[in-house]
Image (cartoon, grey):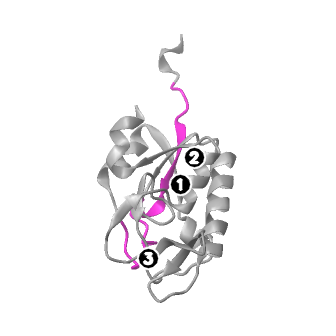
């Protein structure tokens, strides 16, 4: 009897840039066909914490660095944009809660979305262990975070 009834797709939070939205700091996207293909199995909920937090596109590159014992997000021009990153992270968490997302696929190494690895704050392309502002907040609230190279681990 239930053979023709399809179960509802799970909602999956996804960095909008991975879906082709031109919200990357440079004005481009990080379009990823594998991530886009997840739309066959999941209802994709796009987010861009940096834009949601009030930053323009394009914008100056930013990285996380420790300043006076605090994690701060600073652009390559020295502007502190921590407040915008934190605001965007909070908005992303609210979106995840609103849509019942328990997992997210976020842009690797991003100061917002990076999970497990981020750039070191020197703007030298050096990668260090750590989480971006949004990824850390989502994890703290029980949401599993995957990078685009880890989408095979979703199943």
The answer to whether one can see residue 71 in this image is yes
Which residue is tagged 1?
135
* Residues marked 1 and 3 touching at CB (< 8 Å): no
**Viewer-proximal residue among 126 and 150:** 126
The answer to whether one can see residue 109 in this image is no
* Secondary-structure class at tag 2: helix
Q: Quadrant of the C terminus?
A: top left
Magenta stretch bounds: 6-30
Earlier sequence position, callout 1 versus callout 3: 3
In the image, residue 112 sits, relative to residue 68, either above or below, namely: above
* Residues marked 2 and 1 touching at CB (< 8 Å): yes
Residue drawn at point x = 46 percent, y = 84 percent: 60
The secondary structure making up most of the magenta span is loop
* Secondary-structure class at tag 3: loop
Give residue 25's mark. 3
Which residue is tagged 2?
139
Give the foreground label among 2 and 3. 2
* Secondary-structure class at tag 1: helix
Alpha-carbon span between mark 2 and mark 3: 24 Å
Where in the figure is residue 83, as x and y percent of width and height?
Answer: 65, 74
Residue drawn at point x = 43 percent, y = 37 percent: 41
Where in the figure is residue 32, as x and y percent of width and height?
Answer: 32, 56
In the image, residue 65 sits, relative to residue 127, either above or below, namely: below
């Amino acid at each position: 009897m239930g053979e023709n009834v399809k179960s509802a797709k799970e909602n999956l939070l996804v960095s909008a840039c991975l879906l082709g939205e031109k919200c990357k700091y440079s004005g481009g996207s990080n379009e990823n066909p594998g991530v886009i293909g997840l739309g066959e199995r999941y209802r994709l909920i796009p987010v861009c914490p940096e834009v949601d937090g009030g930053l323009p596109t394009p914008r100056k590159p930013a990285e996380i660095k420790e300043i006076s014992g605090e994690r701060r997000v600073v652009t390559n021009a020295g502007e502190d944009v921590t407040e915008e990153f934190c605001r965007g992270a909070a908005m992303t968490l609210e979106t995840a809660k609103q849509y019942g997302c328990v997992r997210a696929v976020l842009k690797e190494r991003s100061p917002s979305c990076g999970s497990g690895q981020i750039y070191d704050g020197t703007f030298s392309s050096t990668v260090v262990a750590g989480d971006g502002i949004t990824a850390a907040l989502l994890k703290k609230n029980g949401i599993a975070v995957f990078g685009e190279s880890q989408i095979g681990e979703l199943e």
